[in-house]
Every structure is written in structure tokens, then in C-alpha cells.
Amino acid sequence: MNEGSVAAPVLEAEGLVKEFRGGDGGVLRVLDGASLKLARGEMVAIVGASGSGKSTLLHLLGALERPTAGEVRLAGALVGGLAEEAVAALRNRAVGFVFQFHHLLREFSALENVMMPLRIAGVPARDARERALGLLERVGLSARAHHRPGALSGGEQQRTAVARALAAEPAVVLADEPSGNLDARNAERLHDLLAGLARDGALGVIVVTHNPALAARADRVLTLEGGRVVTTDGRQADD
């Protein structure tokens, strides 16, 4: 993590509660006061048992869902105070998502997939193409830019998804089990890439993972336990 980056959180969550109502009318509380902070130049891994709410937490941090209670501040903006349209605009601008399944559009090439967020944002085709090519070069896929996902390996597809996540120059990258479907060699290459994004210092990275090798690359490893985020010694993550 870059020196001094802790003083300027790019993502803050305070007291997040998330409840779901079941078919029987009962309420399931998945998160119960989860809090954390993320700085630019920092990579944080979140671990925990299956079903502990890690993906739910990631969805709240990335403004894909709203919490039942608590606050998220993303790139300086308090998400809870924004209308849905403004939340969508903030999310598209400030967050890059990488999921276990890459969700690439199979009818488009790797280049076109990376260009897509830029074109949706109104970036001219020439500029979008230039940035997308630069990102594919960054993830080691220059020679595969014109191949469709079906012609790419699993590791290449996931690196394309990382390039797409970076297209809008986000403040935060959120990755949910990004190497869950990769073999050891491709997983290691993806881990190098994600750790390198944080080291560059321009953004913060949060990864939800069961992979100890990926967690070991992080500046901090936090555990989601009992609906709260705690450090390895059991303290609240934002203490």
C-alpha cells in the first residue's frame, strides 16, 4: 500500500445491516453492523465461511443494492443520499466489477467487450477503441483483442473482464471470487494482475475469496463473521 494512502479512504462503509424477508415472512439478517475502509493503493481481501454474506457485502459496497441500515461513501459521495439515477451514474463511474463468471458478451470480441462501458458512457468510438487496446495490452492480451470469448481460455476471458472493469478508470475494483474457475497457473497470473492494480496507487481493490494464495497478496485480510467485518485478531475492521 502506498505511503499515506490510509488518510484518504476511497470507500467507506459504516454499520451496514442487510435483511431479507423469507417466504414464511421471517426476517434473515445477513449483515449486522459491517464496517470497513479502503484507501487508494490498497488491496483488501475479505474471507469467511460460505453463506456468511461476503457477496452481499460486496453488492452494498458497489452500490448494486441498498443496505437496510448503515452508510456507504464511495469516491467521496454518500450513496444513501442519492436518487437511483445518480447511484447508477456513480457506480458506472467509480466502480469496476470482476465476478467469478466473467459475463463477457459472447457475440463481441475482447476489444468490443472492453469498449462497451465506454461507448455506453458516450465516449467516441475512436477514443474508446484506443483506451480498450491499451487496457488489453496491460493485461497481456494485445494479440487476442479481436478474438471472441469462445476462442479465449478461461484465464484470458477473466483478464478481459478485468480490462473491462478498468475501462471507466474507476476509483475501486470489487472482485468476487475472481479466480474461482481458473487453474493454478491462470489464477496466479490473475492474482498478480489484481495486486498490481493496487500497487499502481490509482485505485483500491477489494477481493472476496476462498483462495489463500490470493488473500496472501492483500495488504489486509478481513473476515466476515456474524454479520460483521473483523480483523485477524477479532477487532472491528474500522477500529
Image (tube, rainbow, N blue to C red):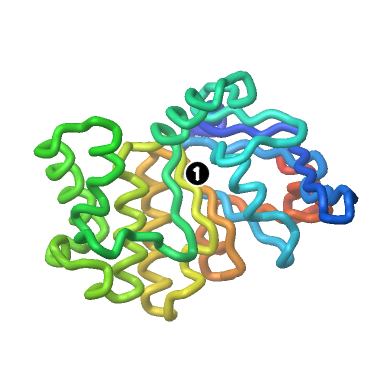
Q: Is residue 41 visible?
A: no
In this rendering, the answer to whether 120 lies above or below 221 is above
- Identity of the residue drawn at 74% across and 47% down: 229
* Three-letter amino acid code of the residue under disc 1: Glu
Residue 67: quarter of image? top right
Identity of the residue drawn at 26% across and 50% down = 114
Q: Is residue 190 left or right of residue 238?
A: left
Nearest the camera: 19 or 212?
19
Would you say 91 lies left or right of 34 here? left
In the rendering, at what x and y percent does residue 135 appear? Answer: 23, 50
Question: Residue 231's x, y, as percent?
Answer: 73, 50
Placement of 115 over or under 105, stated as above or below: above
Pointer 1 residue: 42
User: Can residue 50 be seen at all in this image of the molecule?
Assistant: yes
Q: Residue furthest left?
A: 126
| Picture layout, residue 214 above or below residue 34 | below
The percent position of residue 110, horizontal first and vertical second, equals 22, 60
Q: Secondary structure at mark 1?
A: loop
Q: Residues within 10 Å of mark 1 (few under 14, many from 20)?
A: many
Q: Residue at x 37, y 53 (%)?
A: 196
Residue 224 versus residue 35 in the image, above or below: below
Q: On the picture, is 133 further left or further right than 43?
A: left
Quadrant into which the C terminus falls:
top right
Closest to the observer, 29 or 105: 105
